[in-house]
Image (cartoon, helix red, strand yellow):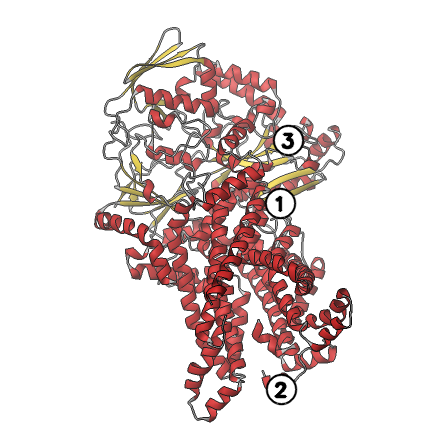
Amino acid sequence: MTTAAIDRLPKSVSPTWQFFSDAFRRHPTAIVGGVVLLLMILIAIFAPWLGTVDPQAVAPVRRLKPPSAEFWFGSDMLGRDVYSRVLYGARVSLAIGIAVALFSTLVGLAIGLVTGFIRWLDAIVMRIMDGLMSIPPVLLAIALMALTRASIENVILAITLAEVPRVVRLVRSLVLTLREQPYVEAAVAAGTTLPRILVRHILPNTMAPLLVQATYVCASAMITEAILSFIGAGTPPNIPSWGNIMAEARSLFQIAGYLILFPGIFLSLTVLSVNLLGDGMRDALDPRLARRM
Amino acid sequence: MFAYVVRRLGATFVVMTVVAFVVFSLLYFTPGDPAAILAGDAATDDDIRRIRAKLGLDEPFFVRFGGWVWALLHGDLGTSIFTNLPVTHLIGQRVEPTLALTLCTLLVSVAIAVPLGVIAAARVGTWLDRAVMAFSVLGFSVPVFVLAYILILTFSIQLDWLPVQGYRPIREGVWQWLRHLILPSIALGTVYIALIARITRASMLDVLAQDYIRTAQAKGLSSNAVLTSHALKNAAVPIMTIIGIGIALLIGGAIVTETVFAIPGIGRLTVDAILRRDYPIIQGVILMFSAIYVIINLVVDLSYMFFDPRIRY
Amino acid sequence: MLKLFRSTGRGATAVMLAAALLSGAAIAQQKVLKFIPQADLRILDPIATTAYITRNHGYMVYDTLFAMDEKFQVKPQMIDKWELSKDNLTYTFTLRDGLKFHDGQPVRSADCIASLERWSKRDALGQKLAEAAEGWTAVNDNTFRLKLKKPFPLTLEALAKPSSNVPFIMPERVAKTDAFKNIEDVTGSGPFKMVKAEWVPGSKVVYVKNTDYVPRKEPPSWASGGKVVKVDRVEWIYIPDSATAAAALNAGEADIWEQLPPDLIPVLARNKDITVTNIDQLGSMGMIRFNFLHPPFNNQKMRQALLYMVNQQDYVIGIAGDPKNGYPCYSYFTCGTPLSSEVGAEPLKGKRDLEKAKQLVKEAGYKGEKIVIINATDQPIVNAQSLLTLDILKKMGLNAEIQAGDWGTLITRRAVKEPIDKGGWSIFHTWLVGPDMVNPAVNFPIRGTGEKAWFGWPTDPKMEELREVWFNAADVASSKRAADAVQRHAFDFVPIIPTGRFILPSAYRSNITGLIIAPINLLWNVEKK
């Protein structure tokens, strides 16, 4: 990382295409990450046309067949085709990762923006956020999953709730710095309304760090989904996700390691690519941010 | 500083109240009835109704919440619905394994991650730096249970070097105790090592760019001395912060690690209790976890003064 | 932080240290049997719950008046002699000598009576006995009497009931506890004593040999005969993850694994020091249970339609994995026991017939009502069955979906009597161990007492009549005839669909001998070299 060079860049820059492409040229790993992620998204979208069969079709007589021409990734304990399940599983894991990133960013942004400006609200909301943050996210998600019926929506809700406080903290700290800036103080002095200040001056400047944060939230949400499924409180078993394919196979890892290997590789690769992308964006957008994270 | 500590403790009290209320109402509205689980598969509706009445589970919300808080203020976390043992006793039984696991993980992680981060920062841009960074990204990307199974398969089953599962109390011999902790600590520590190594590297780079380091280097101090005595000490604040925040991560990971390695710790206690709707245990443990989190972060904040005398409260 | 730990732990540490110093040296020379149980022992009261793990704990610490042997014969256990009056209305029981509770007190008639009274408030067969009984009276400290209002031919079978709830004998002061409240006192008169101080729920249960126990002279057969304990100490080590449990047994960190997923047999078979065997030869039975209150399965024809679709071969393989451990069982009574037969089983046994099933659905007038299967993902046996049933329903073109949760959710959800759109359900799956389905008395899923029946609440007066006929059957032949009639009716009414019988094998290391072949893992007679 050529810190000195980037350090001289202005502190916040709106993310333009030119900027990204420059940055990515300096960060080949981020490009690799982006390509792999794109590939996974394509796999998820085009799963039905990639030589898959119904991922739910059970056939106990064909159970636990090792990888072969018929079953590319083998078959599981109920005779389901693991290749099809892994490909369809990409949909669930990515959907959960992206949805959690999106929702927790939006909710965190809204709460963070408002509390950053309204002091009395800040005290209350931050105590609640501290409370939520002090409960380990996995534990919170497990408790929420036990509370609700197992479904993808609820997995998303549970993980989002666990991630929101972290986003709120980030946004709030950004807002607190920004409101000290002369141009914001000037706007306040000029009697500009609060919504206008937020939209015109604050919001654009939180975008870059939030985008970076969103990639990390996305990566950690995919891991959390796998952990929840492992504990038995995740995605319902009739919907294949990488997490529950591995969870169902975990007692068989000595005799049918491929059941954990394939979804494990896909999950790790995807999370890795999202993380690499996030690192690349972080370095590109604001090197100082790297230290805060 | 004293005023600061008092203020922080006051805030802690508010946070804990929030947690207590949230946790209690969460469980109150949970569909899942310990009475049904207690009675077993063959029980009828009528049996379950009578058990529920005996357990006091059909009382209104505020009566139950009030009762729980009142007992809590007297240091009583209640009694497990299933085992009839006091929650404090159940937690007490399991403090040692979890504490040993988390402390061991923490020590191993810091011992590995900080030097890695420092070296990466000192050799920024080299293959060594890239390797450390690659490892740290990878560490984030592999779920802890996948890693745990790979470790068991390799070191316990193939090589037969280390035990597969379980925990030995330290009083039964330090060596046995340590042997049982090695694999779980590595499995659990990987994410943590990745996290701390990244932060260490980043904050070292930050500090190394400061003027006084350049001065020290100009004065002719050896680069090792600069790294350790000047830079690392100043980079310690962000590192300590991340260790504090990471405690939540560690506890979450401990739940999974304890399951895979059959360690009778608090993580397992909680998961079991959630699956059985043993409300008093869930409430007690979550409250305790958040208290630990809050206290550790308080300690971390206070430690800043040691590492960075410029910080005053 | 280290300092913090030391100061808070001091009180407890001192106690533990003292215990360690006292017992540490002794434990080294003791024979300690390390046993991986099928589940975690949570509840200590075998009357308050039907959980099998609590029943097994009961067999460790308590004794029973009678017990059933492997030939399904009732044998005396705590009883020395007994007689039945000529009018079949009065039983007189005499306890054998030398029976003592763990606290040193002798076992008295009053203890037995209190225990049986508490048991008959919770157990279905016990309730049936209580209905027929006028009452229990103590003649003296070791003789007591049961007076009946009408003859009850199953009295001794009830007292020898091998599975939940087992009529264990507890001290009177414990047995006086409300039947709907858990007991805490683990004082029994059985061959082992529980060391409650060393109990770590979720991890470890410790028992020591009851040196005061006087075993019978007969050889052990199921829970009857002499309960001779051949180890000093038994540790139940609960390992929630089966892959880890397999590894622990492989590494010699445990001696016996009570129940393993058959898929793991190859992992253990590689080790020549480990034997995998079927200690429980009766096995368990899987089942599909319907909701009889709401469409579509309140319609008999809909349930019958499913009977033509369920392929037990698929279910047993789905559950047991290895075809060697799963068998079709086209009977409502546990296969391999006297009352089981294939009477009336053609719809389940014959060729699977989608046309016939579709026709029955049509006759039933199915209008596309939503079918909800409630599933428990943390129970592989439930999960596998749920997915297979969903597959069948889809093949039949029915509007079916799975709603998943954990076992704790399922067990609560199935108590909901409301229709589907208000959180109700249509189908759930579970399984019962062989002894719980051997006859019309213990087989609770077939009962048709409406609101009072097991979840699903079928109203089936004909079934209740047929059961009554069986209860009053005086001899073996008429009992068999009555049971056949029950089954024929069951295949018509379809209270549940049996999905087959499966056996979960046990595994032990080669230094272990003397395991008792029984549907329950009993740890007396087991020797460790």
Subunit of mark 2? A
Q: Nearer the viewer, residue C160 or B74?
A: B74
- The residue mark sitting in front, 2 or 1, is 2
Res C383 quadrant in image: top right
Q: CA distance from mark 3 to mark 2?
A: 69 Å
Other residues around mark 1 within 10 Å, as few (<14) / some (14–19) / many (≥20): many
Q: Nearer the viewer, residue A179 or A137?
A: A179
Vertical side of B204 occupied by C420: above or below: above
Q: Nearer the viewer, residue C86 or A258?
A: C86
Q: CA distance from mark 2 to mark 1?
A: 52 Å
Residue at 60% over, 26% down: C491
The x, y position of residue A283, in whole percent, is 62, 77
Q: Do badges 2 and 1 share one subunit?
A: yes
Other residues around mark 3 within 10 Å, as few (<14) / some (14–19) / many (≥20): some
The x, y position of residue C417, in whole percent, is 64, 31
Subunit of mark 1? A
Residue annotated with mark 2: A5
- Residue A149's disc number: 1
Looking at the rendered structure, the kind of residue marked 3 is Lys
Badge 2 element = helix
Q: Do badges 3 and 1 share one subunit?
A: no
Q: Is residue C228 left or right of residue B199?
A: left
Q: Nearer the viewer, residue C411 or A9?
A: A9
Q: Earlier in the sequence, mark 2 or mark 1?
A: 2
Vertical side of A177 occupied by C155: above or below: above
Q: CA distance from mark 3 to mark 1?
A: 18 Å
Subunit of mark 3? C
Q: Is residue A87 left or right of residue B17?
A: right
- Residue C417's disc number: 3
The x, y position of residue C131, in whole percent, is 47, 15
Badge 1 element = loop
Res C2 quadrant in image: bottom left
